[in-house]
Amino acid sequence: MARREMRHFGWGDPAHVSHPLPDAALELLRARVGLSDVPRPPVPIGAVALPAPVEFDVPGVQLRSDHEARLLRAAGKSYPDLFRMRSGTVEHAPDAVATPRSAEEVRAVLGAGVAVVPFGGGTSVVGGVEALRGSHPAVVSLDLGLLDRLVELDERSQVAVFEPGIALPAAEGELNARGFTLGHFPQSYEYATVGGCVATRSAGQASTGYGRIDAMVVGLDAACPAGDVSLLTAPASAAGPDLRELFVGSEGALGVLTRVALRVRRLPEERRYEGFMFSSFEQGCEALRALEQEGAAPHVARLSDEGETEVSFAMAGREGLVAEVAGRYLRARGVERGCLAILGWEGTLDGAETRRAASLSVLRRHGAVSLGRSPGRAWSRSRFDGPYLRDDLMERGVMAETLETATTWSNLGALYRAVSDALHAHAPVVMCHVSHLYETGASLYFTFIARQREGEEIEQWRQAKTAACDAIVAAGGTITHHHAVGRDHAPYLRHEASDTGLAALRAVKAELDPDGIMNPGKLLAP
Amino acid sequence: MARREMRHFGWGDPAHVSHPLPDAALELLRARVGLSDVPRPPVPIGAVALPAPVEFDVPGVQLRSDHEARLLRAAGKSYPDLFRMRSGTVEHAPDAVATPRSAEEVRAVLGAGVAVVPFGGGTSVVGGVEALRGSHPAVVSLDLGLLDRLVELDERSQVAVFEPGIALPAAEGELNARGFTLGHFPQSYEYATVGGCVATRSAGQASTGYGRIDAMVVGLDAACPAGDVSLLTAPASAAGPDLRELFVGSEGALGVLTRVALRVRRLPEERRYEGFMFSSFEQGCEALRALEQEGAAPHVARLSDEGETEVSFAMAGREGLVAEVAGRYLRARGVERGCLAILGWEGTLDGAETRRAASLSVLRRHGAVSLGRSPGRAWSRSRFDGPYLRDDLMERGVMAETLETATTWSNLGALYRAVSDALHAHAPVVMCHVSHLYETGASLYFTFIARQREGEEIEQWRQAKTAACDAIVAAGGTITHHHAVGRDHAPYLRHEASDTGLAALRAVKAELDPDGIMNPGKLLAP
């Protein structure tokens, strides 16, 4: 376990010190949600009870089965994961943690006769790394942290080959040093691994410009219980079904990615993020659609609805420049609640400016009002901070959770309303932003916040989550745009893949993983 | 069979009258290849012997089993297909041709207990529609020509839903009338169908700008022997492996596409194609790489090597403006044999011009010399004529065949030389062009021409084809960039998918098509 470890009960750096919430944010939370007067701190790591480990051995591979190792590989970072950690009620943990140093050692672990849960950054928010053993005698967490090299960078072809366990900041650092970037910045950036992103079809904050991780994969190798799969690195091919697309998003249920070849781009000279206001979410969505369909989209494009805009301004503090400017704009227009967009252009100095000019021309036509660079800088500073904030809220007795979907532009408004309505029945604060643009549609990212119902926190979460998932399915959205399937979304997959489609996927699993040892209970519901 | 029928012995319109080859082209062919003095005309359609049909019935579905119906569905349009037709030595033919009028009728055909060969435009050049029956008592050609509707156009989301059998010109016509385009123009454009393009991962002449067909698919339905598959239309998703990518390129071996949802774009106001000269193929490739990687690529980008440039000029005729201008350019540079590129920009008037300006800046830096619009117009006029020319050459005792591959930019030169060398051992004229650009690499499209060895024409073709395929595999190229796998490339698939990868694909086939009735002998080698 070579990587930096996250704190067991929450997100991120154990040394992280939270800034107190701005008064405006506290006021809003007190008025709308309610805060616990008594802090609800996590139980200490030693006080979290784990089931007794089943002993087993993998010849030639380092295994750890001490309490801390097992605990830190027991779960991801979803709200229920964290609630269980904080309250010391962890149900499942790996019997041991294996840290292979080579693809050969990965194969040895796959041959050990126990269930295997591949573990990259451990950032799953859908139960993707929960240590379920299925019908097997034991379960091992296959920690890929030592397989962390940039194997090769073909600068001419702009193709980088990585081992799976390299963390995104390390990958980005190695590429940057040679003048390149992956351009992949999910909110989990500081801990997520390249292999984990590929295995979960990750999208990042700049994916409107750089493309989702699935658009970057040009080749891969995987170790499966039935044998090794090696897929040719090619820019494009008509050689039958694209088997890369079977392993991208396979979530460790078919095998373990041992190498991935990704398209990289030149490191941008300029990254320019700016704020804009729209008088409604609908107006903003129309502007984003025009940007994308007219080929003038920025690299980063995020549009908050009225609720999220209000919270963003509260978080920025009363005296924040942003809120002031926005307030003036809104009053001048007679609009009570506007919508904030953060747009960002990257590239060469000239390239970013040319692109920005093209965007501005479309934005003006759609009634956008510029707020300048200040909101862009504020967003950029705090772009990876959301998960820390969730921890702070949990400390105050508040449930905060996110979920996401995507659909066509035509269906976006209906899907937005359906999911918002479903969540409002369970949470007083529901907010949303459009986070990724495509020619045919966009994604919606929801956050919902409610006072915890003490003693039934998990059930409370499940009710809200189920209501939202049911609404997504009924309204024709995909069950997940970039969080993946894991355990939480598995029951919904059939609605978009159809039963016969899922049967095909199960057939692939049966072929590659005949004993069903790979990540049991994830992706494909039992 | 509602569609226009192609002539049975060759490409295209039975009313097509060939123009005589320009003198320069005839001279070149006589000197380098040799032409038969005695024309080798095809045998009349009635004189082509077919095996006796096995009788069977599909309740409720129209079947034809007359000689002409069977003959016209017996093969695609590869060189060996056409040679067999011309010489009246057709080995396989469907026992009957079914023309379902609905997805229900497609399902009825799949339930008939006979082998099923889906037939779209019949333009396969890899044996994809050869009427093989496998181990089944009979084989039916499933002609999708009556399923030819644009079902829905969502203008707001830029998504068009098609039935599979609609021909590209009809699809394009319906879209154009409403201000949209698919932007998909393979050389087979005049006959290819939308479903056929999706099933074979087609790429078109403007795919550098509009994307390959696989980049356009946002949803699909398929009828499989095991049941119907229906995949949600979504702009993007992280809901596990992308099952769309299993059916795109499935070549009728898993089931029959019954609906496809494709991303469309606004009909361009401007289509501007121009010619440029480079002093070498290598210099031209570097320019194309820069265009693509700097985000300044045109919609159409084709770069001929020295050999193809020479033939293009000969085909344009001695007096052709192009050849004259090119000649001046070459002499002025002291270059004996230059390379012709055709580049094309599409979009709004402003958009195309802005894009063109960006391209020109890169092109100048890479030593390109403009030949103006005349070569662009000449290319545009004849862009779908290649297959007619092949027929004319066969009439004169000449074998002309094409094949294609793709690889990374770093490997492009080595792959080019390896395949060229392999083909030169079998054909005096070998030429190549780069036809599609990607950030990580490009495609290579080879044409080879040789005097037929009378009496062993098929064996002659097989030797050249095998040499080229072996060279492609050894040099790390994909066995096909856009012609698909069919029967001809099936033995090579394992080199890029690996045996375990192919086992996964076989498992999908066994699940969806348990009796193996779907297009036996294609895609997956027996």
Image: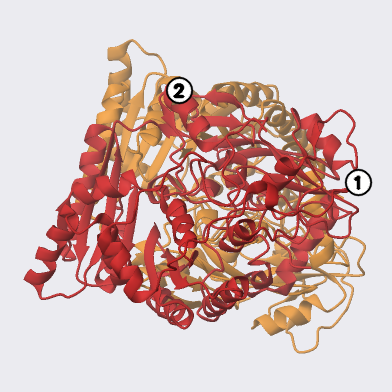
Chain colours: A orange, B red
Relative to B250, residue A456 above or below: above
**On the picture, is A433 further left or further right than A71?**
left
From the viewer's perspective, is the residue at label 2 or at label 1 nearer? 1
Which quarter of the rendered picture does the N terminus of chain A lie within? bottom right
Same subunit, labels 2 and 1: the answer reads no
Q: Which residue is mark 2?
A: A281
Residue located at (62% from left, 49% from top): B44
Residue B128 appears in the figure: yes
**Disc 2 secondary structure class:** helix
Q: Nearer the viewer, residue A78 or A242?
A: A242
| Residue A225 image offset from top left, x and y in percent | 79, 73
Report the front residue among A33 and B111.
B111
From the viewer's perspective, tell me whether residue B217 is left or right of residue B258: left
Q: Amino acid at mark 2?
A: Phe
Q: Nearer the viewer, residue A134 or B413?
A: B413
Q: Secondary structure at mark 1?
A: loop
* Residue A155, quarter of the rendered image: bottom left
Q: Position of residue B385 (x, y in %)?
A: 41, 49
Q: Are there few (<14), some (14-19), or many (20+) residues within 10 Å of tag 2?
A: many
Label 2 resides on the chain identified as: A
Residue B188 circle label: none
Q: Which residue is mark 1?
A: B113
Q: Say left or right for A475 vs A170.
A: right
Q: Residue at x 38, y 27 (%)?
A: A287
